[in-house]
Image (spheres, helix red, strand yellow):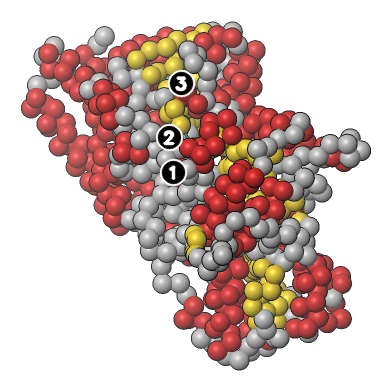
């Protein structure tokens, strides 16, 4: 794989990690007054997938969408302002963390009703085909979304119409505090579900950005050629609490040992080791990279904090298209 | 002797209602996302699985629509399910099962079967829950014949109404407001029912009737207190059951006061508040001294920005100001005192994050 791509995958992951950690650090100030679902630990999936997309390809996501938005090229300042409920936010303060959008980056929207953007992604893919466009649509969702009826209804249509859509399932084993064991039968491999619909399907290590990149590359290429949909299941792990800035292993729904095991498999550390080992980056380069990202993020936070809040009249803006 | 002056939080009262019914009746079971998890649906289902086992207290796949049908099926053959949704908004996935199936099974098969099903759902106001996590859709459910709709406002009623709902042989939509969860009040121990279909006068007054739903009952009471200091006697009625509606109590009150103000947690347009106004206009028109008035949400989705929540959620000051206008008083009186001290995206300062 090209050195530049490897470096880019690393820096994009680092950027998302640093943004999420900044949010976690600032959240206790109580100025970001909306639920936040951080993707720390899962960055490789967003980055490895989106690195294969053109700017005008489409992406949709759910409640845990910061990484997808940023990896697709969503504007950082507008995202931070949205978290702060400001009028300069990507949704003008109407949506918060759970409703990100950046049309100029092809990020068609993220909404927090589990599974509900899957059919919308399939519909976007249908629309692009009807319009004769060569775009690919990627829908990101957690493994719990595969339990919703709409997932099954939508993937069936995608298969039927051979739509240019890639289903990216981030299997982090939990839905809030509920493990897969209370939701799906023992021994189920989620990616096998898609095969039942006649959709090409693969499983890969979601904490290995190169593996993600390569799996997504094949899926995106196939979709672009008119070869139809692919389902990708990436196993990964959410480090922080389901919703909010802290850790929640103390609740007892999962073990500290399990968390530590996944913590050791940090997608960013793994990539960093490889880059250093292969002399693609030196420690100094990484520090420099982090410093410039820190400056960018700090600027975005300042922008968000200093932006004006929406005014009363704006409550009634955008209810319907004029 | 049972000491009845103990206080419980709303969430504990709900928990106790379920516990009491499960202990009494082995047909009662609980199903819902996160029901047995360490947070136990904001405390309302904590400890139940330990007590009643994994068969009667179960988590479920993230499949609201299918699982609602499953609950209905089990009810048809003799079980009494309690389905729990952490938000009203998630229950919408199951609207077909609720409206087409549960609501009509008794009617469309000529009364041969019934669906003793309780569907709990929580209105998740505040902390930027926003457009898809904080809707008050009681009017939708109340519109459908065959569904009973309950919205308790106090811990006492939460327990008594939930027990009555579980005992009920028809599907009951039981809507709980997240802002009531931490409110404490007296709750009798043991089994008792607050009957469905009965509203309650929670404060007496002779100048106007404020009819309120759920959390807005607390705001109405707060308003009534300040109005009293100005010499205005507001009678406050907690609707408690939206369908069937206790028309009699509301008409009696309006016949005495001659004025009707409705305070609802939902949108105004085609809202539940409109139903009460319509019924009073139809049946108590001669008693009305002034046009009825509604205090409800403005007709736009719930915004996330905390600054906008200030303009979105009506509170005691709005209720009191509307009451003064109805009485014909000018100016805002002492209404400024009623403006909440905390931002309108949290019920009290103890809320410091997502919930
Ligand atoms: C239809 C619906 N049901 C329930 C919820 C509550 N909820 C929010 S996030 C979440 C967890 C979903 O788990 P998963 O899809 O695996 O994503 P993860 O949080 O693990 O990233 C749930 C159940 C919801 N938002 N929408
Ligand atoms: Mg998950």
Closer to the eye: label 2 or 3: 2
User: Dot 3 lies on which element?
Assistant: strand
Q: x, y (%) of residue B158?
A: 60, 58
Q: CA distance from mark 1 to mark 2?
A: 9 Å
Q: Are marks 1 and 2 on the same chain?
A: no
Closer to the N terminus: mark 2 or mark 3?
3
Residue A119 image offset from top left, x and y in percent = 59, 27
Query: Element under label 2?
Result: loop
| Mark identifier at residue B250 | none
Taking depth in this image into account, of A97 and B79 the one nearest to the observer is B79
Which residue position is annotated with label 3?
Answer: A168
Q: What kind of element bears circle 1?
A: loop
Q: CA distance from mark 1 to mark 3?
A: 29 Å
Q: Tell me whether circle 2 and circle 3 mark residues in contact (CB < 8 Å).
A: no
Question: Please, which chain is the residue tagged with disc 1 on?
Answer: B
B136 vs B42, nearest the viewer = B42
In this rendering, the answer to whether B204 lies above or below B297 is below
Badges 1 and 2: C-beta atoms under 8 Å apart?
Answer: yes
Q: Which residue is mark 1?
A: B39
Tell me which residue sits at (49%, 78%) in the image: B338
The 10 Å Cα crowd at callout 1, few under 14, some 14 to 19, many 20 or more, is: some
For the residue pair B301 and A251, the one nearer the viewer reads as A251
Identify the residue position indicated by label 2 in the image. A177
Picture quadrant where residue A68 is located: top left
For image coordinates 41% across by 46% down, the residue present is A35
Q: Quadrant of the N terminus of chain B?
A: bottom right
């Amino acid at each position: 794989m090209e050195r530049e791509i490897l470096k880019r995958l690393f820096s994009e992951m680092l950027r998302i990690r640093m943004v999420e950690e900044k949010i976690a650090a600032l959240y206790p100030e109580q100025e970001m007054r909306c639920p936040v679902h951080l993707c720390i630990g899962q960055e490789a999936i967003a980055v490895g997938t989106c690195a294969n997309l053109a700017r005008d390809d489409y992406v949709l996501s759910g409640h845990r969408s910061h990484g997808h938005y940023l990896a697709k090229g969503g504007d950082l300042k507008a995202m931070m302002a949205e978290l702060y409920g400001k009028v300069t936010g990507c949704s003008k303060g109407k949506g918060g963390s759970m409703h990100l959008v950046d049309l100029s980056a092809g990020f068609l929207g993220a909404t927090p009703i589990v599974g509900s953007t899957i059919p919308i992604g399939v519909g976007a893919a249908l629309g692009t085909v009807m319009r004769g466009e060569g775009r690919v649509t990627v829908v990101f969702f957690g493994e719990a979304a595969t339990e919703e009826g709409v997932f099954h209804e939508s993937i069936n249509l995608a298969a039927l119409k051979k739509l240019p859509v890639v289903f990216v399932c981030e299997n982090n084993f939990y839905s809030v505090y509920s493990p897969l064991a209370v939701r799906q039968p023992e021994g189920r491999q989620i990616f096998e579900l898609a095969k039942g619909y006649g959709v090409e399907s693969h499983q890969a290590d979601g904490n290995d950005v190169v593996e993600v990149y390569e799996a997504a590359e094949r899926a995106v290429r196939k979709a672009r050629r008119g070869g139809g949909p692919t389902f990708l299941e990436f196993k990964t792990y959410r480090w922080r609490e389901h919703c909010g800035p802290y850790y929640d292993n103390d609740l007892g729904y999962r073990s500290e040992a399990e968390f530590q095991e996944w913590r050791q498999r940090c997608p960013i550390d793994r990539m960093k080791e490889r880059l250093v080992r292969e002399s693609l980056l030196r420690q100094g380069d990484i520090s420099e990279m982090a410093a410039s990202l820190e400056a960018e993020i700090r600027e975005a936070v300042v922008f968000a904090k200093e932006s004006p809040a929406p005014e009363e009249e704006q409550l009634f803006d955008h209810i319907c298209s004029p | 002797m049972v000491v009845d002056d103990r206080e419980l939080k709303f969430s504990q009262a709900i928990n106790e209602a379920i516990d009491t019914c499960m202990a009494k009746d082995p047909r009662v079971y609980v199903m819902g996302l996160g029901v047995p998890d360490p947070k136990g649906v904001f405390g309302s289902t904590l400890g139940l699985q330990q007590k009643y086992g994994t068969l009667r207290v179960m988590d479920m796949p993230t499949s609201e629509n299918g699982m609602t049908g499953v609950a209905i099926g089990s009810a048809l053959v003799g079980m009494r399910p309690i389905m729990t949704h952490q938000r009203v908004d998630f229950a919408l996935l199951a609207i077909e099962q609720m409206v087409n199936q549960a609501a009509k099974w008794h009617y469309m098969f000529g009364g041969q079967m019934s669906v003793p099903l309780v569907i709990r759902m929580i209105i998740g106001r505040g902390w930027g829950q926003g457009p898809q996590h904080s809707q008050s859709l009681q009017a939708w459910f109340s519109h459908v014949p065959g569904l009973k709709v309950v919205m308790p406002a106090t811990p006492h009623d939460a327990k008594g109404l939930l027990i009555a709902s579980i005992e009920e042989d028809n599907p009951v939509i039981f809507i709980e407001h997240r802002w009531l969860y931490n409110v404490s009040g007296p709750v009798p121990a043991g089994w008792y029912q607050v009957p469905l279909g009965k509203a309650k006068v929670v404060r007496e007054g002779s100048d106007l009737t404020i009819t309120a739903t759920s959390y807005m009952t607390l705001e109405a009471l707060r308003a009534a207190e300040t109005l009293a200091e100005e010499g205005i006697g507001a009678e406050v009625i907690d609707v408690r059951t939206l369908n069937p509606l206790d028309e009699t109590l509301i008409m009696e009150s309006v016949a005495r006061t001659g004025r009707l103000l409705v305070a609802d947690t939902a949108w105004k347009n085609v809202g539940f508040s409109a139903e009460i106004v319509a019924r009073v206009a139809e049946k108590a028109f001669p008693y009305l001294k002034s046009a009825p008035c509604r205090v409800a949400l403005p007709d736009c989705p719930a915004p996330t920005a905390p600054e906008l929540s200030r303009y979105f959620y009506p509170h005691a000051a709005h209720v009191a100001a509307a009451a003064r206008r109805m009485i014909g008083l000018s100016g805002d009186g002492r209404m400024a005192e009623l403006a909440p001290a905390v931002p309108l995206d949290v019920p009290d300062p103890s809320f410091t994050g997502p919930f």
